[in-house]
Amino acid sequence: MKVGARCGFCLLHRGYLQIVRSTDDEDVRRETVEALLRLLAEEFDEDAVPAVIGSKRDRIIHRLTGCPDPYLDLKREANEAALEMLPDMESLVEAKPVGERLRAASLIACLGNVIEYDVPGHSPDFAEAFSRLDEEDFYIDDLEAFKALLGPGVSLLFLTDNAGEIVF
């Protein structure tokens, strides 16, 4: 994804909230914000990739605050919430006709991926995301091609990047 104008706001907003989660020391916060602003000044241009800048931002925050994971407690809570919801999600999939179960399970897995912390416009609430399940569909729908690849003895590796998401 190429960088858009709004990406600058999001990178700075999320960075600031990560800094606040990482330390109570106001001097360290200011120093870290200064480093974040330098990063954006040096790297935020039309060829930038938001994920690359975000990774660099996260490393700067870790290095300057000494906090390896400002979201550790939230991740634990997300995993617990997802595990609590799992029986309901399994029931939802099982209630679908056999031919629609893979679609339902895939949509649930995708909705689990929308959980992001400190991103403007995104809610880290599983219940809210799943309340929209019947309204959602895939933006790019390759489910039939995916089904064709499935068969006996086929293994799947799921790569996830959000806490709680792995449950679904």
Image: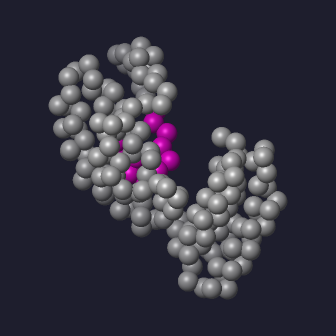
- Which span is picked out in magenta? 157-168
Whether 35 is drawn above or below 85: the answer is below
Residue 102 forms part of the magenta stretch = no
Residue 33: x, y in percent? 69, 73
Could you say which is closer to the camera, residue 168 or residue 39?
39
Q: Is residue 129 left or right of residue 12?
A: left
Q: Is residue 51 visible?
A: yes
Tell me the residue at 78%/46% (across/down).
46
Residue at the extreme right of the image, as rendered: 42
Residue 142: x, y in percent? 46, 22
The quarter in which the C terminus is drawn is top left
Dominant SS in magenta = loop
Whether 110 is drawn above or below 38: the answer is above
Tell me the residue at 51%/62% (across/down).
118
Tell me the residue at 37%/15% (across/down).
151
Tell me the residue at 21%/37% (across/down).
92
The quarter in which the N terminus is drawn is top right
Residue 83: x, y in percent? 28, 51
Q: Is residue 59 visible?
A: no
